[in-house]
Each structure stands twice: as structure tokens, then as C-alpha cells.
Image (cartoon, rainbow, N blue to C red):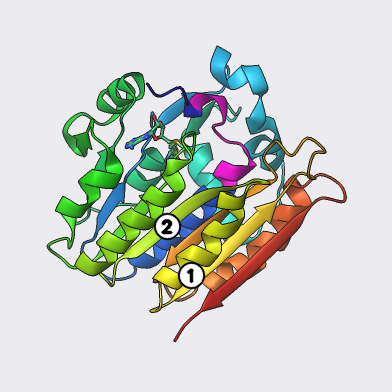
Amino acid sequence: MLAYRHAFHAGAAADVLKHVVLLDVLARMATKDKGFLYVDTHAGAGRYALDQRMAQRLAEYAGGIGALWPRTDAPPPVQRYVDAVRACNPGGALRVYPGSPLLAASRLREQDGMVLFELHPADYRALRAEFGADAQLRPEDGFNGLKALLPPPTRRGVVLIDPSYELDSDYARVLGCLRDALTRFATGVYLVWYPQLQSLESVQLPRRLKALAPAGWLHAQLTTAAPRADGYGLLGSGMFVINPPYGLHDALRESLPWLADALGERGAARWVLDAHQP
Ligand SMILES: C[S@@+](CC[C@H](N)C(=O)[O-])C[C@H]1O[C@@H](n2cnc3c(N)ncnc32)[C@H](O)[C@@H]1O
């Protein structure tokens, strides 16, 4: 039984990093006319009401999108993301947070396709209500389901792998799923979100991902909180991109210092950006 509900965390600093990277990648994919397939292996509910009980309980969005909402000095990649969230809040006040499926849908063109996997029955129902026939929806395990979609017919694709890591086995499943996906579709663009924790699995994941991706990768990490004495708690998060599109590195070099300053606790804010292009 899945306990994790993204509604508690929607719009937090971790979503900001993930969604800035996602939108930048999708914008770069759309510079070519040929269509591409977008696959979200862990889609969530698609849309989150920030004034409802789950979002209000921890109010994590206040330290993420909420902190960016009044700013007028964001670098263009961050501004593009804030504008996409604004488009879901026509009244001007921040009430709704769009998850990755909705943000992706705002960038996709007629020639592109979208497949969304979501295992939680309530979040799957929400996705169905949101998208109906406008996306291929799968109430299935995204790690397993991805392989049947690769390679996409147009040989162009972006895959977001965004598990909750509520099970430690998710770390190994991310690696296994990617290993398999790369044998089927080596040129795909794969985006992996991971939590920055004081745990061995979390610390080792970027190194393990690098070993999987000899053809090119980019790794961005945004730390917003100081380590706690008890070893628990989220310090920040990372995005690992396999086959990153040209220009993403420059966009993040511009955005990460600004985001660290805007979202990080005093004295704790850090960012990392490294990449390998053979
Ligand atoms: C971090 S949330 C996704 C957030 C979403 N990608 C976004 O950025 O808005 C992870 C989601 O994966 C779902 N989930 C967990 N295990 C799954 C699996 N094996 N396959 C598909 N969905 C899964 C959870 O129910 C949860 O809604």
C-alpha cells in the first residue's frame, strides 16, 4: 500500500528544481519540429490545491513556489517556470500548483505524445479527471511499464523518473529501469529526481547514475536546509539528466545560484552543477 501523497509536498523547493529542469528540457526539445514522447513514470495527481488540507498541513510550498511568487528578478529559466505556474492561477493569487504532467502538457505540441504512470488510485483518478483522453494514462508500475514504450516511434523522447523513494528499493529500481531503458533507447533524454538525505543510498545515487551514462550526463543539486543532528530530514534534492539537451547547463548555471539564494536557509544554501560530455 502506497502511503506517499505528493499533495503534502507539492510546490516545495524540491519541486521547483525538478520543474525548472523539466520545463527547460521540454522547451529545448520543442526547438525541432519532429514530435517526441514525454513519459512520466511517477506522475502524481497532476494538479494540487494549495489551500486544501494536505498542502496546508506542512505548507512546504511556502518555502518553494511561494517564496518565488513575489520575486521580479528571476533568471529566464526560473521565470519560465513561475510563468507556467501563474498560468494555472489566473486570479493572480497562488492557489494551485501544477504537477509535472500539467506543466509538461503546457509545453507539448500536437505532434508530441504523453504517457503518464501512477499507481495510487486516488491520484490516478485525479489524473483521469484532468486529462481524460488527452494523454495515455496507465494505472501501473512506471518502472516496469516504461520498457514497452521504448524506443518511441519518432526516436525522440523525454522520460521523467520521479519516485517518492518511500521504499528504499526505489533507488535500485531507478538504476535497473534506466539500465534497461538505455539498452532500448540510448539517445533518450532521462530526468531522474532524487532526495538529498543523510543516507548512503541517496549519497551514492549520483555516482551510480554517472556510471550508467557514458554518453553524457548533467547533475544539478540544490541544498536548502542544514543537516539535522538526528540524521533525518530533507536537505535538498537533485536532478540527474542523461543525454542533456544543449543549453541546459548554461540555463542551470544561471539559475542555481539564484535559487539557492532565494530558497536556501541562511548558511545552508548550496548548489552543485557538474556534467560530462564525451
Ligand atoms: C514524487 S510523486 C510524483 C510527482 C510528480 N512527478 C510531479 O512532479 O508533479 C511520486 C508518485 O509516484 C507514485 N508511485 C509510487 N510508486 C509508483 C510506481 N512504482 N509506479 C508508478 N507510480 C508510482 C506515487 O503514488 C506518487 O504519486
User: In the image, what residue type sits under mark 1?
Assistant: Lys
**Residues under labels 2 and 1: Cα distance?**
13 Å
Q: Chief secondary structure of the magenta span?
A: helix
Q: Residue at x 31, y 29 (%)?
A: 119
Please indicate whether residue 209 sits to the left or right of residue 182 in the image: right
* Image quarter of the N terminus: top left
Find residue 34 and report its horizontal and vertical position in percent: 20, 68
Residue at the spot x=28%, y=21% of the render? 125
Residue beneath the point at 47% across and 26% down: 4
In the rendered image, which residue does mark 1 sit on? 210
Q: Quick one: which residue is furthest to the right in this view?
A: 267
* Residue found at the very far left of the displayed protein: 153
Pointer 2 or 1: first along the chain = 2
Mark 2: few, some, or many residues within 10 Å (few <14, many ≥20)?
Answer: many
- Above or below residue 108? Residue 117 is above
Question: Circle 1 sits in a helix, a strand or a loop, which is it?
Answer: helix
Q: Nearer the viewer, residue 216 or 208?
A: 208
Q: Quadrant of ligand 1?
A: top left
Return the mark for residue 189: none
- Quarter of the figure with the C terminus: bottom left
Q: Is residue 59 highlighted in magenta?
A: no
Q: Secondary structure at mark 2?
A: strand
> In the picture shown, does residue 17 fall above or below 131?
below
Quadrant location of residue 23?
bottom left
**Would you say residue 271 is visible in this rendering?**
yes
* Residue bearing mark 2: 191
Mark in front: 2 vs 1: 1
Q: Position of residue 155 (x, y in %)?
A: 18, 68
Q: Provide the residue span drawn in magenta.
A: 7-16
